[in-house]
Image (tube, rainbow, N blue to C red):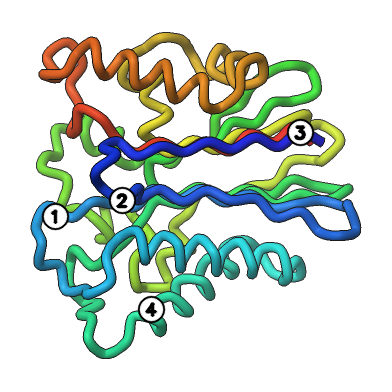
Amino acid sequence: MRIELATTPGDPRVPNEDYASVALPASGQGGVLVALDGVTPPEEDYGCVHGVPWFTARLGGALLELSGSRRDIPLTDCLSRAIERTAEAHGSECDLSHVRTPQATVVAVRWDAERVEHLVLSDSALLIERTDGTVTPVLDDRIDQLIAAGRRPLAPLRNIEGGFFTAAADPAVARRAVTGTFPRAGVRAVAALTDGAARWVEVFHEGDWAECFALLRKEGPQSLIDRVRAAEDADPERIAFRRGKTHDDAAIVFAEL
């Protein structure tokens, strides 16, 4: 088995709001990977004294632990319980009803000898490489659909019916995730990318998802992030390639099963 992970902040002076981790059981049978992209609030007052990095670390750690230890329950239930556990950890000093309460996108993958389960919530990406070499992207495309329909600004459409969903304080949002299962025998490798890393495909159009996966396999996650940084640096004013931030936090987990 080959596992590689890389993450870098968009701005080295600001804490990285992405989270990425892998857990492999002592039995050697199967594993779990989790990648979260924390949502940066547009203002300082968002009802929480902890901050987004605290939230992604708490939620990501809880989801990793639950997905690995409670293999008898679906990933949606693991995410729901992880959200509930994290909400309880906030304490009474935080206003979890605030529309900007800390939140994150989620990618989770769990595999054993029989199957590969996945969960994707919001705009991070999961890539599944089949044993025949084909690469299947698993995406929650609700944001893309809203943009295509001219539904801007997006902020009022977060976590409401007809909009898009992120993991925040409501455990019920786990049911909104894109989920599925592949036979383990048909999967060669998987990769989870936060949207800061997925920019290589989605923003800068340097290649498609299959070419992205080939690059990850050949050169590793850090090389892909370095290429994204080079593309960002070449367009610092965001004129050629429109995007919300010049640089964004980026995280990738690559697992060859």
Q: Disc 2 to disc 3, how far (Cα)? A: 28 Å
* Residue 125 visible, this orientation: no
Give the structural element (helix, strand or loop) at label 2. Answer: loop
Q: Quadrant of the C terminus?
A: top right
- Tell me, yes or no, whether the two marked residues, 1 and 2, touch with CB atoms within 8 Å: no
* Neighbour tally class for label 3: few under 14, some 14-19, many 20 plus, Cα within 10 Å: few
Instruction: Using the image, tell me which numbered label, if any, was put on residue 134.
Output: none
Check residue 2 in the rendering and tell me which mark sits there, or answer none.
3
Q: CA distance from mark 4 to mark 1?
A: 22 Å
Q: Amino acid at mark 1?
A: Pro
Q: Amino acid at mark 4?
A: Ala
Left or right placement of residue 208 versus residue 170 in this view: right
Q: Is residue 27 left or right of residue 196?
A: right
Front disc: 4 or 1: 4
Q: CA distance from mark 1 to mark 2?
A: 26 Å
Please tell me the numbered disc located at residue 87: 4
Q: Secondary structure at mark 1?
A: helix
- x 46%, y 10%: residue: 207
Q: What residue is drawn where x is 31% and y is 50%?
A: 15
User: Which is more foreground, mark 3 or mark 4?
Assistant: 3
Mark 1: few/some/many CA within 10 Å (<14, 14-19, 20+): few
